[in-house]
Image (cartoon, rainbow, N blue to C red):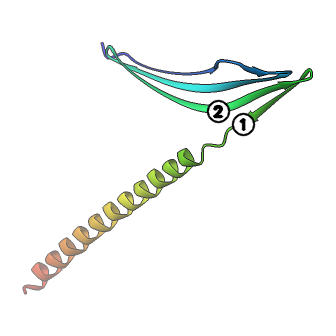
Amino acid sequence: MNQVTLQRTTRPGETFAVGDLRVTPEAQALILRVRGSTVVWNRPVAVVVERAGHVQRIPIVDVTRRLQIGLVGIALLVAISRLGVSIWKKERARDRVSESFHRGD
């Protein structure tokens, strides 16, 4: 049976301490399992900063990831539009052949 599982987890990393400052990175893992094979994609998501009893979670904006997703989206739009133009041209050519056949050209 083809079992496919997709799991997303967020886990803290190793905490670093300097004086009263503690910094803990957080990473998100996307785990894809297909027929005994596993692919793991890790990415940083935040840094938790603790100082003098105050805790602040600072998100990490992954600009590269956003650009990659945008480029994939643009590529899909271009591919879909080219497919549409190709289909339109074929139908147009078929209609022209059909018209000339019915006219007797």
Question: Picture quarter containing residue 55?
Answer: top right
Q: Going by the picture, which residue comes out furthest to the left?
A: 104
Say which residue appears at 69% left-offset and 32% top-offset. Answer: 46
Measured along the vertical axis of the image, is residue 49 above or below residue 66? above
Reading the image, the residue beneath label 2 is 45
Element at badge 1?
Answer: strand
Q: Name the quarter where the C terminus is drawn.
A: bottom left
Question: Picture quarter containing residue 94?
Answer: bottom left
Say which residue appears at 10% left-offset and 79% top-offset. Answer: 101
Residue 8: percent from left, percent from top: 56, 23
Q: Which mark is residue 80?
A: none
Question: Picture quarter containing residue 90?
Answer: bottom left
Reading the image, the residue beneath label 1 is 59
* For the residues bearing labels 2 and 1, Cβ distance under 8 angstroms: yes
Is 7 positioned to the left or the right of 17 in the image?
left
Front-lying residue, 2 or 20: 20
Q: Name the quarter where the N terminus is drawn.
A: top left
- The kind of residue on which mark 2 rests is Val
Say which residue appears at 66% left-offset and 43% top-offset. Answer: 61
Residue 23: percent from left, percent from top: 75, 25
- The kind of residue on which mark 1 rests is Pro
Is 35 positioned to the left or the right of 71 in the image?
left
